[in-house]
C-alpha cells in the first residue's frame, strides 16, 4: 500500500548490524514517514523524544504516543507506515532481534 500524500521520508541511521541485532536510529521531521514496511524480526523501540505517531495499517489508522525512554516491544510480522504527527522532530532507536535457528 502507499500513502495518499507525498511525505518527506524519515531518516534511518544504522548504528549496529550483525548476526544478532540491527540497531537503527530513526529521525522524523514533522509529517515525515517511514514508508510501508514489514518487520521480519521481533523489535524494541526506545523513544528519544515525546511525540505522537500515526500508524497506517491494513486494519486502518492507529495512534501511538511516544514517551522519552519508555521502550516497547513488538513481535515480527507487523506491516505499517509510520508518520510523525507531532509539530516537532521526533526520534527513536529501533532494535531488531534476529532469530537463530
Image (cartoon, grey):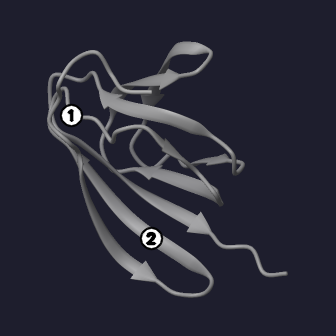
**Label 2, residues with CA under 10 Å away: few <14, some 14-19, many ≥20:** many
Identify which residue, 76 or 23, lies in the foreground.
76
Percent across and percent down for residue 59 are 62, 15
Percent across and percent down for residue 5 are 21, 18
Tag shown at residue 32: 1
- Indicate the secondary structure of the residue bearing disc 1: loop
Q: Quadrant of the C terminus?
A: bottom right
Question: Residue sitting at 33 percent across and 35 percent down?
Answer: 50
How many numbered discs sit on the rendered protein? 2
Percent across and percent down for residue 32 are 21, 34
Q: Quadrant of the N terminus?
A: top left
Decide: marks 2, 1 in contact (CB < 8 A)? Answer: no
Percent across and percent down for residue 70 are 51, 45
In the rendered view, would you say 14 is above or below 41? below
In the rendered view, would you say 79 is above or below 21? above
Question: Residue sitting at 33 percent across and 42 percent down?
Answer: 34
**Label 1, residues with CA under 10 Å away: few <14, some 14-19, many ≥20:** many
Tag shown at residue 23: 2
- Indicate the secondary structure of the residue bearing disc 2: strand
The quarter holding residue 7 reads top left
Question: Residue sitting at 58 percent across and 21 percent down?
Answer: 58
Identify which residue, 85 or 4, lies in the foreground.
4
Question: Residue sitting at 60 percent across and 87 percent down?
Answer: 19
Q: Earlier in the sequence, mark 2 or mark 1?
A: 2
Q: Residue furthest front?
A: 1
For the residues labelled 2 and 1, the Cα–Cα distance comes to 20 Å
Amino acid at each position: 500500500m502507499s500513502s495518499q500524500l507525498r511525505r518527506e521520508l524519515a531518516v534511518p541511521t544504522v548504528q549496529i548490524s550483525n548476526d544478532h541485532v540491527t540497531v537503527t536510529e530513526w529521525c522524523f521531521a514533522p509529517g515525515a514517514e517511514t514508508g510501508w514496511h514489514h518487520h521480519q524480526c521481533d523489535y524494541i523501540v526506545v523513544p528519544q523524544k515525546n511525540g505522537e505517531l500515526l500508524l497506517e495499517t491494513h486494519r486502518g489508522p492507529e495512534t501511538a504516543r511516544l514517551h522519552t525512554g519508555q521502550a516497547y516491544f513488538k513481535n515480527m510480522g507487523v506491516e505499517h507506515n509510520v508518520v510523525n504527527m507531532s509539530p516537532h522532530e521526533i526520534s527513536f532507536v529501533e532494535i531488531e532481534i534476529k532469530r537463530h535457528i
